Amino acid sequence: MHILMLHDRYLQRGGEDESTDAEVALLRSCGHAVDLLEMHNRQILERPLWQTALSTVWSQAAYRLVRQRLHTGYYDLVHVQNFFPLLSPAVYYAAKAENTPVVQALRNYRLFCLNGLFYRDGEVCERCMGRPVPYPGIVYACYRESRPASLTVATMLSVHRALRTWHRKVDLFYTLTDFARRKFIEGGLPPHRLTVKPNFVAPDPGLSTQNRRYFLLVSRLSPEKGIMTVLDAWEKLGGRLPLKIVGSG
């Protein structure tokens, strides 16, 4: 297959960037031709805020770029990793204008939650789930602790919910877990277009031949990753085995 991969890279490299690179490498190793078209969020620092706000809802530049790429080359599929905020949902419309199927990776809950986490003030929060306008996220300034920034994300979600963009313009979504799939179904995405594709490690290192007894947590060190839950569980086990934590944050 000839695949056009779209990705908006984060200011701080994290799991989504790593997963995107791993998927590109895996697909290429299996004989697929993958062209990676990407933006980088460092570009936000060089733009006026109003321009970023408008392009978050609809980026005409990204629309033209994707249409041009699809028009000048043959592609079987557009694979969208992260569209937020520089690519915007406009890329779906560009793909459909060129009659190209679209697959969207779902590695966070951005379609239903302004911060993408379902997590606020140290607790699970799903107050925006199912709302046509996710106004609680604006009230609580859930995106970057800024009401103007939260309003921008809420506007993007509200506009494209009204347009039914994710129902009409995306052929297949994949989540990382069954739990996440159920959440997206609860939020209104069509079940028959949702599948599960876990993350992977390539190449597989296999099982260690050494007898090493310890708990290992590999994670970004932030509250929503459940660091405190792991520490509480380890303490309840009496600390009988060492706990090793690999990550930064």
Image (cartoon, rainbow, N blue to C red):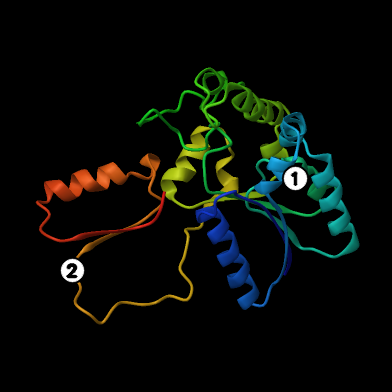
Q: Is 121 left or right of 216, judged from the image as shown?
A: right
Q: Is 91 left or right of 224, judged from the image as shown?
A: right
Question: Residue 99, position in %: x, y?
Answer: 83, 52
- The mark found on residue 129 in the picture is none
Is 187 above or below relative to 216?
Answer: above
Q: Secondary structure at mark 2?
A: loop
In which quadrant will I find the N terminus?
bottom right
Question: Residue 33, position in %: x, y?
Answer: 72, 72
Type of amino acid at the residue the image marks with label 2 = Arg
- The mark found on residue 92 in the picture is 1
Question: Residue 210, position in %: x, y?
Answer: 23, 80
Residue depicted at 33% across the width and 44% down the height: 226
Type of amino acid at the residue the image marks with label 1 = Tyr
| Front residue of this view, candidates 47 and 233 | 47
Q: CA distance from mark 2 to mark 1?
A: 48 Å
Q: Which residue is mark 2?
A: 213
